Image (tube, rainbow, N blue to C red):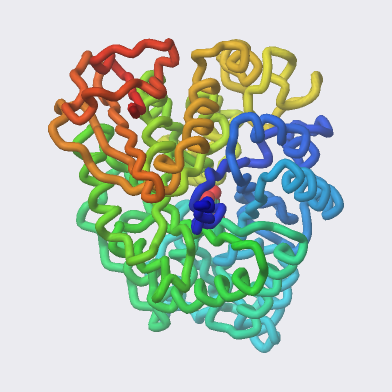
Amino acid sequence: MSRPVPDAHAWWQRGVVYQVYPRSFQDADGDGIGDLAGILSRLGHLAALGVDAVWISPIQPSPMADFGYDVSDYTGVDPMFGDLAAFDRLVAAAHARGLRVILDFVPNHSSDRHPWFAESRSSRTSPKRDWYVWRDPAPEGGPPNNWLSEFGGPAWTFDAATAQFYYHAYLPEQPDLNWCNPELRAAMLDALRFWLDRGVDGFRVDAIHHLFEDPGLRDNPPNPDWRPGMPPARRVVRARTMDQPEVHDAVAAMRRVADAYPGDRLLIGEAYLPIDRLMLYYGADLSGFQLPFNFHLLSTPWRARDIAALVQRYEAALPPGAWPNWVLGNHDRSRVASRIGAAQARVAAMLLLTLRGTPTIYQGEEIGMQDVPIPPGRVQDPWERNVPGLGLGRDPVRTPMQWDRGPNAGFAPAGAEPWLPLASDHAVRNVAAQEADPRSMLSLHRALLALRRAEPALSVGSHAPVAGAAEDVLAYERRDGATGRRLLVALNLGGEERGLPHAASGSRVLLSTRLDGGAAPRLRPDEGVVLGR
Ligand code: NOJ
């Protein structure tokens, strides 16, 4: 008798990650800001959606200068979100539903209110002085070099108490930690262990490409491509402040910590880098991140040939054994429906959930949320405040989740004022309304995730481009190695009806982005289909 072959893939290879931005997901206590109890109360939504893991943006204590990405205690929970007991309840409830929990880990910088920084800045001889990056002024008294902060202004702030500058890749309230210091490194790895001991299934590691800087502090070269309207930090090429070789050793150290725990703990790395540089973050012999985030769909023109070329380049660049991943949006980037339009956002969802590799879905994308214009008086994002008017602010993609047509769209109790305004379409675009609509964006996501779960070809199968499709059509085949089952994905990225590629003949539509049961032999405008026999 033949036995089923055990699936050799890890949960994070088969699975789908869903990002929760905790301030904006669900407010249980009525302060207008989401919290852990709120997330717990909405786990049913994630289970019904069919995702496998929830990544929660930072929940640690923070003065919130950068909304949690400025941590003042790596082993606690900000009272705004709850406490450790609430966190433990959330993990237990998620695990009971078969959902994994991934936390954000912010290793590059702490808050300036972290006790470590208070100690570090207190004197040049403080035992923690070297936990941060301190330097003397340049001979004429200015900053040590020309490095710029991502959020505008110089990357160096002068501290009169000890007459030195400290370095910050982001806000002055986010001083960079010095990973060259072994004690700092050990303390940060202990912070990982603290959460792993509490049962977290992995981490999304923030801003990893910023972890080290040039030890010689050489200037960054000017950027000949900089134009007015681009972020001021892009005036220089960040050759000395990003993607330094020392980073890989630090990532491998994080990975060893995670691997010491049972259950395939996952490390995802946040690095906005060209494909060849990104690949190095898998580490030598895959000793680095299991998933260095692949953000290239965010910046590739939404055209079939460009996306086909991207997929091929990315697949070809993967080191042996490395697992791919894809991202369409997050709390830092314009929402997909605003970038390419509502009709194509459905096609994009099918792309994300049928490409080879682990997909990450940002909260709200499953109901097609759009960027929300923020009135000037309600701007929260420090980037927008520092560099106004260039459209850099990230508040528009962080507005509260739209659950129902009730007060505050179900995000917060009646009478509460959400920290960011709700989208004007919340009464019609919300989870409850879309649950009741069999053709909604939410129904499409549920159907895609269900199909992906039912068809191993879509989750762990191989990928091959399909030639001969029309100009606007992106087509590829997914094939399950164990059974040989083949599925064809054909996506119409244009607004004109198009023929299906020849390879589709004889197959039937398993799922159309239209969700209307239509099985036309042609692709309708803005339609994507998964075909099989
Ligand atoms: C990347 C995070 O996603 C972003 O929100 C944050 O502002 C920076 N890193 C700094 O931590």
Answer with left or right where residue 218 lies relative to residue 416.
Answer: left
User: What residue is drawn where x is 66% and y is 61%?
Assistant: 111
Q: Is residue 370 above or below residue 520?
A: below
**Most distant residue in the bottom direction:** 125
User: What residue is drawn where x is 60% and y is 31%?
Assistant: 49
Count of marks placed on residues? 0
Q: Is residue 133 above or below residue 323?
A: below
| Position of residue 90 measured from the top left corner of the image (x, y, whole percent) | 78, 46
| Position of residue 507 measured from the top left corner of the image (x, y, whole percent) | 29, 24
Q: Is residue 313 above or below residue 448?
A: below
Question: Toward the viewer: 241 or 198?
Answer: 198
Answer with left or right where residue 86 lies relative to residue 315.
Answer: right
Question: Toward the viewer: 441 or 407?
Answer: 441
Question: Toward the viewer: 11 or 408?
Answer: 11
Q: Is residue 448 above or below residue 248?
A: above
User: What residue is drawn where x is 43% and y is 78%?
Assistant: 246
**Most distant residue in the front direction:** 1
Answer with left or right where residue 198 lies relative to residue 8.
Answer: right
| Position of residue 107 measured from the top left corner of the image (x, y, whole percent) | 58, 66
Answer with left or right where residue 378 lies relative to residue 300.
Answer: right
Quadrant including the C terminus: top left
